[in-house]
Amino acid sequence: MSSNAVPGTEPTGRAPGSTGSAGTGLSNVDTAELSSDELLALAEELEQRTRDVPARLAAITGTATGPHGIRVVVSLAGQLTDLDLGDACRRLGAAELTAVLRDLIWDATDRAIAAGVEVVAPIAGPELAGELARLTAPPPRPEPTPATPAAPARPARPPRPDDEDDFSAQTFALRD
């Protein structure tokens, strides 16, 4: 690390003497030319710009609503924080409801992550923000599979005749 770099940052590979720190919004600042007072002022400005970031990130949620009125809310950490099924659970089969919930949770999570990147991007700088956007882009999702019909019910056994005159040895293990 160059002795001219802002403490806690890495040099960016720019020309010698240009040791502005990537990811801090200071990438265009030549710290080699700054006095200690100016460096302290930059550090204070950065601290002020980032002070509320943890609270803003913690407050982020993503919401998705499906065609059946199902609504899900997911935190930035991917935790399901709210679920409203409405009447959908009565109208949809288990497999279809599961698929709809999965897709909605994925959509809500993607929205929460995109909102988190938007909060961090102004502080991270364009290069790091672009990389964050690339790394957090929604992955390809599998095509929805059509719900398979339930297997037909096994036919009921024919009733056994109860004949009071039948003295054969019939138990659950032995049958004539």
Image: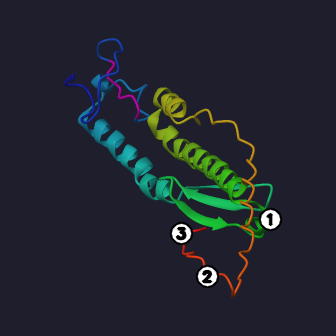
Residue at x-position 60% and y-position 44%: 110
Q: Amino acid at mark 1?
A: Arg
Which residue extends farthest bottom?
164
> Residue type at mark 2?
Phe
Left or right: 118, with 146 as reference point: left
Q: What is the C-alpha distance between the residues marked 3 and 2?
A: 13 Å
Provide the residue span drawn in magenta.
Answer: 18-23
Mark closer to the observer (3, 2): 2
* Viewer-side residue, 128 vs 99: 99
| Distance in Å between CA atoms under marks 2 and 1 | 52 Å
Q: Secondary structure at mark 3?
A: loop
- The residue to which callout 3 is attached is 174
The overriding secondary structure of the stretch rendered in magenta is loop
Q: Quadrant of residue 170?
A: bottom right
- Give yes or no for residue 89 being in the magenta stretch: no
Q: Indicate the secondary structure of the residue bearing disc 1.
A: helix
| Quarter of the figure with the N terminus | top left
Q: Position of residue 34 (x, y in %)?
A: 30, 29
Which is in the foreground here, disc 1 or disc 3? 3
Magenta residue check for 22: yes
Which dot, 2 or 1, sits closer to the camera?
2
Quick one: quadrant of the C terminus?
A: bottom right
